[in-house]
């Protein structure tokens, strides 16, 4: 099983209260427009699904309102309901050195929020369900392991 | 004639060799909420909206990664 080690990211000045967060480089692609953009996305084990800030859809050539409106919206800490729209997107995980893709996801309807003050969140559905993730907070690194899908011919033989 | 036995190079995992222990991002303006990073994790542009940061970064390079910068001192609960 191939494994990839992603160092944690620290933002701002180093100090006693410094927080290291598990960010990974991803390429988000819109199959309808053919546009793609790289993002540093936060791996969030507490999130049920992936969430994109409003700016992502605009960069990928779609207005936020063009997606399917999610009547249930999204809820976080504080139980405040946030309206979201579902857009068809493909998430590709890049290698730790950001030089090439190592895992390409399926086309999924991913919730996109209107507000831009939000990180790209990688949750269970659409991302974490495909990996064995080890959060090594002591050594400040995230280890992602995954199995390559077997070719169709081998499955037919079995 | 004395035989020469080449020594094997020590094995190194490519991930560990290439990657730093941690990545540090420090925008010039502490109020910037979005930054664009190149493949070496250097900030190439920063601003408050992802679209403006992307437009600035596009002029410098084709391959870059946008990142939301959490405000320093604020506890985030995602």
Image: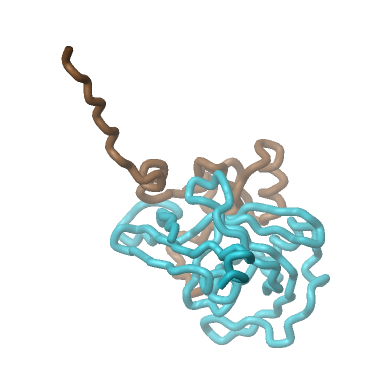
Chain colours: A cyan, B brown
Please say whether residue A119 is visible from this viewpoint: no
Q: Residue furthest left?
A: B2
Horizontal and vertical percent for residue A97? 49, 46
Q: Position of residue B72 (x, y in %)?
A: 46, 59
Q: Quadrant of the N terminus of chain B?
A: top left
Q: Residue at x 52, y 82 (%)?
A: A77
Q: Is residue A15 above or below residue A158?
A: above
Q: How many marks?
A: 0
Tell me the residue at 49%/71% (across/down): A44
Q: Is residue B25 left or right of residue B31?
A: left
Q: Is residue A11 above or below residue B13?
A: below
The residue lying at 77 percent from left, 80 percent from top is A69
Left or right of A111: which side holds A58? right
Which residue is nearer to you in this view: A6 or B3?
Answer: B3
Q: Position of residue A49 (x, y in %)?
A: 59, 76
In the rendered image, which quarter is residue A84 located in?
bottom right
A128 or A21, nearer to the observer: A128
Q: Residue at x 41, y 55 (%)?
A: A5
Q: Position of residue A43 (x, y in %)?
A: 50, 66
Residue B8 position (above or below residue B49): above
């Amino acid at each position: 099983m191939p494994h990839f080690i992603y160092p944690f990211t620290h933002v701002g000045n180093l100090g006693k209260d410094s927080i290291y967060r598990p960010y990974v480089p991803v390429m988000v692609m819109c199959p309808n427009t053919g546009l793609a953009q790289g993002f540093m996305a936060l791996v969030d084990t507490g999130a049920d699904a992936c969430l994109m800030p409003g700016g992502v859809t605009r960069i990928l050539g779609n207005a936020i309102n063009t997606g399917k409106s999610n009547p249930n919206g999204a809820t976080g800490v504080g139980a405040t309901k946030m309206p979201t729209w579902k857009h068809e997107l493909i998430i590709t995980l890049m290698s730790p050195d950001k030089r090439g893709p190592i895992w390409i996801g399926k086309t999924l309807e991913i919730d996109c929020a209107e507000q831009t003050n939000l990180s790209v969140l990688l949750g269970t559905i659409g991302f974490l369900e495909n990996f064995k993730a080890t959060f090594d907070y002591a050594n400040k690194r995230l280890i992602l392991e995954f199995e390559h899908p077997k070719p169709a011919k081998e499955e037919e033989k079995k | 004639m004395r035989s020469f036995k080449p020594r094997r190079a020590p094995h190194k995992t490519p991930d560990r060799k290439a990657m730093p222990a941690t990545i540090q991002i420090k925008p010039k303006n502490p109020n910037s909420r979005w930054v664009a990073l190149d493949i070496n994790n250097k900030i190439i542009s920063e601003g408050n909206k992802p679209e403006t940061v992307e437009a600035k970064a596009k002029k410098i390079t084709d391959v870059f990664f946008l990142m939301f910068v959490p405000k320093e001192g604020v506890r985030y609960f995602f």
